[in-house]
Image: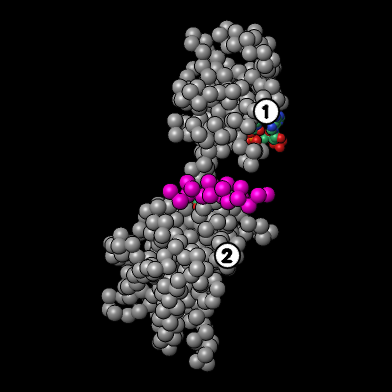
Amino acid sequence: MNPTRNFVSDFREAAPYIHYLRGKTLVVGTVSGLLAGEPLKRLAADFNLLASLGVRLVWVHGARCQIDQVITEHGGTPQYYRHRRITDDTTLTHAKYAVGALRYDIEAALCSSLPQSPRRSKPLTVAAGNFLSARPLGVIDGIDMGYSGVIRKIDTEAVLNRLDQQALVLISPMGYSLSGKTFSLDMYEAAAALAVALKAEKLIYLVGQDGILDSEGRLKTNLSAQEATDLAQQQPDSPQSRLLRHAVHAVENGVTRSQILNGYQDGGLLQELFTRNGSGTSIARNAFAKVRQADSLDIPDIMALIRPLEEQGILVRRSQAYLETHIHTFCVLEHDRHIYGCAALKTFAGHNSGEIACLAVSPDTRDGGCGERLLEHLCQAARRQGLTRLFALSTHTGEWFVERGFQPAAPETLPPERYQEYTANGRNSKVFVYPLGETV
Ligand code: COA
Ligand code: ARG
């Protein structure tokens, strides 16, 4: 394909996301393996790009590999219990050393002027500090977890102030107690807690796998909170389950989306944020697509859906003016601020019949039940309006309606005004009728 055409269509796909992300807060948690070499450089460049688009960024970094390495270099063996580090005095000293060094590396990477960086002359300001207070995890199953802690409070106001000053807020997995002690924290937990406290738009985990995988290793691209919880329960002690539980906690407490993706994939973060299908797993509180009443802002999307079908003669042509005056009769199927389907319910004055019209689902979303959801929505709307029969006129899709309980009917059974139009337009569509009162 012509590369320019690719660029143009990709840019068009990205445009609504660029607009939507401006001014939004994203909390990004990154596993420690990503924080060196090329992956770190690429991440820093992508964060610079996002900041230049007005995205408010909170970067929560892990430090597991770096702490393990310092412990090993000093002749020790990292100790864990239930995926949490056991932090004795010596381990805490090593952890402070490792996290301090890592922070310098991250700050340096954020300053480095990459050829493609949009902020070559002015580096992104980084704000770090004592934003997290912590308390000890305590003794678990008889094991003293030492200086491993859990978050007690977040200084949300201080973080928000730094974000308002256009700084990237960098959070290390360390928290402080009121008695002045330092505790090592879990990156996943810290990121989820921050996302909730800041009422972030998104919580993003950049990890070492492609996203959330099912038991056969296949990527799950979209999950509802319930589906994610069910998946977590399949292997309750696995690292993926821990990740899922934090991701679900965030969406159940006000964060719009938790997204989990492969941080090693060059451009994976940008692909997730600026394309419709993303690159990893997106988790939202509720099932993703919803049917809602259309409004005039949906007209360009509806036109984009129906024009190709009109050109093929599958749908009758509707002008923009027609759509503007009849938009109140339309419903749309929306997913992630994109319109994937539409349908209209036409009613006839003095008649208790309605017509399902202009039913269309975008080609890349067909066979997923969207058409049926739109139909169901209109059946319910028709019942609420006290209609007793629904018609559908179709040149190509009769079987689809028949399989959903519609029956062939004679054109003469149409409301008189519709019958007149039917005979005048010469489309010779087949007529189907559905008696309301029965469930579709
Ligand atoms: N005739 C018969 N069956 C059809 C069909 C057709 N023209 N188009 C799709 N189907 C079948 C699919 O094969 C699939 O069957 P399966 O579940 O056995 O695999 C099933 O319908 C899919 O149903 P669903 O997922 O609920 O529908 P959808 O989201 O794919 O949307 C349409 C269905 C008809 C709205 C969609 O195919 C479309 O937009 N078509 C073009 C526009 C059109 O014909 N509109 C109706 C004008 S009256
Ligand atoms: N770009 C959109 C967003 O960030 C959609 C991403 C969809 N991602 C997915 N894994 N299904 O919200």
Residue 167 placement (x, y as % from top left): 34, 65
Residue 90 included in the magenta stretch of the image: no
Query: In this figure, which residue is indicated by the disc labeled 1?
Result: 312
Q: Residue at x 43, y 88 (%)?
A: 90
Q: What range is drawn magenta here?
A: 1-20
Residue 350 placement (x, y as % from top left): 49, 8
Asked if the residues shown at circle 1 and circle 2 are in contact, with their CB atoms under 8 angstroms apart, the answer is no
Q: Residue at x 59, y 30 (%)?
A: 306
Q: How many marks?
A: 2
Q: Which mark is residue 130?
A: none
Question: Is the CB of mark 1 within 8 Å of ligand 1?
Answer: no
Q: Is residue 277 above or below residue 240?
A: above
Q: Closest to the observer: 368 or 2?
A: 2
Q: Closest to the observer: 150 or 350?
A: 350
Q: Closest to the observer: 1 or 159?
A: 1
Query: In this figure, which residue is indicated by the disc labeled 2?
Result: 266
Main SS of the magenta part reads helix
Residue 265 placement (x, y as % from top left): 59, 65
Secondary structure category for the residue under label 2: loop
Q: Which quadrant holds the C terminus? A: top right
Q: Is residue 406 above or below residue 137?
A: above
Mark 2 Cα shell of 10 Å, populated few (<14), some (14-19), many (≥20): some
**Amino acid type shown at disc 2:** Asp
